[in-house]
Image (cartoon, rainbow, N blue to C red):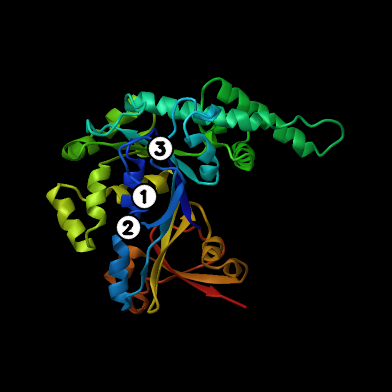
């Protein structure tokens, strides 16, 4: 299971700079003029996880495979994008398949970078949300009301189309109303079928000046109040600092962050917010061949988690040899765990916990 995030924002808010930093290479053109990004850029970034190096030392392997997140960076949107203004609208289709939308909002004060439509974080967010809402309304307008003796499910689907349309016409995001439609699971199902942008969970990245980053990270509540969103959805970063971190070795990154008074990079904090927003978690595998982090949805059972490794594993699941990360480290691996009786044998009904270290027993 991979995590995918679509990056949106007005021109020149730092989207491409952040995208390049997250991927640790120059992929997207980051330039001081609007619409520097013409073609949408997609890339894979590893999710930093300090636990993996510790497990690798215990398992005596040098092969470490972190969980990954896919980022898609599209052209900057402007007011009127949904009606063809600027270049961004034609690329909205590229983020319709993503799991979440990441709004990059400009708060840095570099006078040398053109403010193409950017006014303030809250007003910029309103502009982008409006364009996403209009784009979704356009999608819904193409739907046709079923008639006659057709499948009853088509009438149920049409009822949700009408509900989605009402939400959007009233200026709200579909995601905010999903729980109010009666059957949230059905609402999510039809919203996903329609690829509605406004039904996707949102993450908000506030791109600030380098010298104010440390202080602004402490002001998440202020930003949540200003944007009228939850604190857990917000990440404060300096795209410029992330660019500087990206070219450093892991050891130098730690030192550089320490000099700035920071414990984690923007990517680490963004990954945590994305996981929480999307109700995801990781389990770990640790053997001589490799140490690896796997992304799963919260609430998944052991067989479902095994199926993330290989689809056949869910079908042929027998049991899961499981322990916590802390115990695995304390007792130096499976051998030490066995000696003190800390290995759990979990069956098909076991609900996975974040940070479980697991070996799945699979039949034929």
Report if the CB atoms under discs 1 and 2 are less than 8 Å apart: yes
Q: Which residue is mark 2?
A: 48
Q: Residue at left 33%, top 36%? A: 33
Judging from the image, what secondary structure is the residue with disc 1 in? helix
Q: Is residue 259 above or below residue 114?
A: below
Q: Is residue 341 above or below residue 149?
A: below
Judging from the image, what secondary structure is the residue with disc 2 in? loop
Q: Earlier in the sequence, mark 3 or mark 2?
A: 3
Residue 228 visible, this angle: no
Judging from the image, what secondary structure is the residue with disc 3 in? loop
Q: Which residue is mark 3?
A: 35
Q: Is residue 203 above or below residue 68?
A: above
Q: x, y (%) of residue 80?
A: 49, 25
Report if the CB atoms under discs 3 and 2 are less than 8 Å apart: no
Q: Residue at left 22%, top 51%? A: 244
The image quadrant of residue 230 is: top left
Residue depth check, mark 3 versus mark 2: number of the one nearer the observer = 3
Please tell me which residue lies in front, 319 or 151. 151
Q: Earlier in the sequence, mark 1 or mark 2?
A: 2
Q: Is residue 287 above or below residue 322?
A: below
Q: Which residue is mark 1?
A: 271
Q: Residue at left 55%, top 27%? A: 83
Q: x, y (%) of residue 297?
A: 49, 52
Measured Cα–Cα span from mark 1 to mark 2: 8 Å
């Amino acid at each position: 299971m991979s995590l995918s995030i679509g990056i949106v924002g007005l021109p020149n808010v730092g989207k491409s700079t952040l995208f390049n930093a997250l991927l640790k290479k120059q992929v997207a053109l980051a330039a001081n003029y609007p619409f520097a990004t013409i073609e949408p850029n997609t890339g894979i970034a590893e999710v930093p996880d300090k636990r993996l190096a510790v497990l690798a030392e215990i398992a005596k392997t040098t092969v470490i495979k972190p969980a990954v997140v896919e980022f898609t960076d599209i052209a900057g949107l402007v007011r009127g994008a949904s009606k063809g203004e600027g270049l961004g609208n034609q690329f909205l289709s590229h983020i319709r398949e993503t799991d979440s939308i990441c709004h990059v909002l400009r708060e840095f004060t570099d006078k040398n970078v053109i403010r193409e439509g950017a006014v303030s974080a809250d007003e910029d967010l309103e502009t982008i949300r409006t364009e996403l809402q209009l784009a979704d309304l356009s999608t819904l307008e193409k739907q046709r009301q079923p008639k006659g003796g057709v499948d009853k499910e088509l009438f149920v689907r049409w009822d949700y189309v009408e509900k989605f349309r009402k939400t959007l016409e009233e200026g709200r995001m579909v995601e905010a109303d999903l729980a109010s439609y009666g059957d949230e699971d059905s609402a999510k199902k039809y919203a996903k079928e329609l690829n509605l942008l406004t039904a996707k969970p949102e993450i908000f990245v506030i791109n600030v000046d380098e010298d104010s980053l440390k202080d602004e990270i402490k002001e998440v509540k202020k930003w949540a109040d200003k944007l009228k969103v939850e604190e857990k959805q917000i990440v404060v970063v300096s795209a410029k600092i992330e660019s500087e971190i990206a070219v450093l070795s892991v050891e130098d990154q730690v030192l550089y962050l320490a000099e700035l008074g920071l414990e984690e990079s923007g990517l680490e904090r963004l990954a945590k917010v994305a996981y929480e927003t999307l109700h995801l978690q990781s389990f770990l595998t640790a053997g001589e061949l490799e140490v690896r982090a796997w992304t799963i949805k919260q609430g998944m059972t052991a067989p479902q988690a095994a199926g993330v490794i290989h689809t056949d594993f869910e079908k042929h699941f027998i049991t899961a040899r499981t322990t916590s990360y802390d115990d695995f480290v304390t007792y130096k691996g499976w051998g030490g765990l066995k000696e003190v009786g800390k290995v759990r044998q979990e069956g098909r009904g076991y609900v996975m916990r974040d940070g479980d270290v697991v070996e799945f027993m699979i039949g034929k």
